[in-house]
Amino acid sequence: MTEFLKALRTLLAQLAEHEASEAHWGHLLRALVGDFPADASTLMVMDGDALRPVALMGLNDEVRGRRFALQDHPRLAAIASHPGVCRFPHDSPLPDPFDGLIDEDLSDVHDCLGVALRDEERLTGLLTLDALEPGRLDGLDDAQLLSIARLLGTCLRLAERLRTTRTRLNEALTQEPSSEVGWRWSSRAMRQLDNAIELVAPTDMSVLLHGETGVGKELAVRALHRRSGRHQGPLVQVNCAALPESLIESELFGHRRGAFSGATEDRRGHFAMADGGTLMLDEIGELPLSLQPKLLRVLQEGEIQPLGCETSRQVDVRIVAVTNRDLEAEVEAGRFRADLYHRLSAFPLHVPPLRDRPEDIPLLVGHFLEINRVRLGLNNLRLQAEAETALLAWHWPGNVRELEHTLARAALRALGDREAPATADRRQAVALIMPDHLDLPDDRGVAVSMRHHEVSAESATSPGPSLSMKEATEAFQRHHIQASLRDHDGNWAASARALGMDPGNLHRLARRLGLKAS
């Protein structure tokens, strides 16, 4: 109880300042149900029309990236509608959302219960407990579970009301709309980017967004627009590289009928279409030098002159320029105007590559696995531990887009290995993605991962070329865990937090790797 009170006090103090993190919710969940004989437990909150996990025990971190819509999960829907503790018989025909996600052999859950968390009659979340053995949870006291549910419900209600109060206060002070809740990134780099977007979005400053191909720059642009005072206006996107050079001026600024051969009717142009909103100029580095002075004039004067028109018109447009090029190098090479570059980069933002933020991979993996589970009609889709290790070890030259496509292909291959061609019922299937399904190169990932985790040459054993991918990645995991334990004086809980893992998952991984986990 002392541990629970400390966790609750920490959580409430965090909520008083800003949104609580998964670590705070996880500490509270462990303090409440950590001694229960369950193999897995979740605390989920309503996020729109779906449940979002905020705390996990006994489940992989990728589950945090999933969303559980009640209409897709009848067992969760049954818990949500039950007035008390909802217990399921071990032979319940309702599929469990965590079947195949708890242990290595895809075992089904055989003992399951849950409690709905409510604010009066409104559902705010769920607490679930699962065990692989029938009857394991029979001894739990329903009255105690309901008391826990009331405490968690109070925390969720307080979290929502504090968030609503802060939102209204911010709107009253800034007269700007609040931002929508987006990803809760694990990496410091993405949290810094999110904070920078939050800072610049309410202004009208031009933003230069740069990053490698596939990192998610378009999502950052959407976040900028959504959090701005222009969110009710249009967001117009134009790819400068996809436009023929002879038509770029017309596409951007518009034209009158008869302005040139083929101009059979008036055209507004992208700037006019974006009036009152945001214009995303994708691949701005591809804009021809001949057109750059005209774009600069629009940015300076706030007016456009369509082709064939004798008069100019004012436009109110916020520019977000996007590029995967080094525009400073382009300026030095004479391929991009320096004055236009400085005008566009009033507030530069960098979207980091995936190899620099491996902490976010489990979150993204969970998101993409859930998308493919629904697409393929599976009961569940999960990664084998070695497959997750391979994902974390690869350096992702194609970034998030490469990860998305890799998992889509792997899910299909896993399904093909899982089911008999004509007899399998996908609705009851749990497909396991193994390293071979990923089809990743096996010669560079571990070394890159070690470099980005800053494991010193003295503390890490360099995998030899004769090692298989599995052996090399396990060697890296073993040394990385040992290094973390040394840094935290053998404290497994502190090491789990530093590694961004659930303590139960760390203990299981350590046992599998042959490390003594107390």
Image (cartoon, helix red, strand yellow):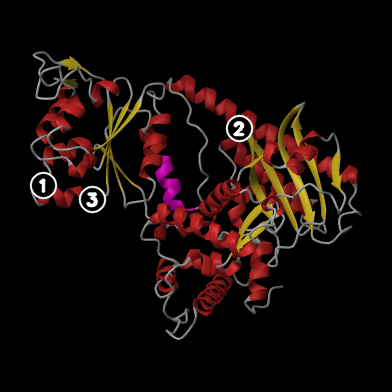
Q: The disc labelled 3 sits on which kind of residue? A: Arg
Tell me the crowding category of disc 2: few under 14, some 14 to 19, or many 20 or more residues within 10 angstroms, Cα based.
few
Classify residue 110 by image quadrant.
Answer: bottom right
What kind of element bears circle 2? loop
What kind of element bears circle 1? loop
Residue 86, above or below 1: above
Q: Do the residues labelled 1 and 3 touch (CB within 8 Å)?
A: no
| Direction from residue 410 to residue 512 in the image, left or right | right
Circle nearer the N terminus (1, 3): 3
Q: Mark 1 points at which residue?
A: 335
Tell me the crowding category of disc 1: few under 14, some 14 to 19, or many 20 or more residues within 10 angstroms, Cα based.
some
Q: Is residue 176 magenta?
A: no
Q: Can residue 482 be seen in this view?
A: yes
Which residue is painted at 9% across and 40% down in the image? 289
Q: Name the residue under label 3.
A: 325
Which residues make up the magenta segment? 187-195
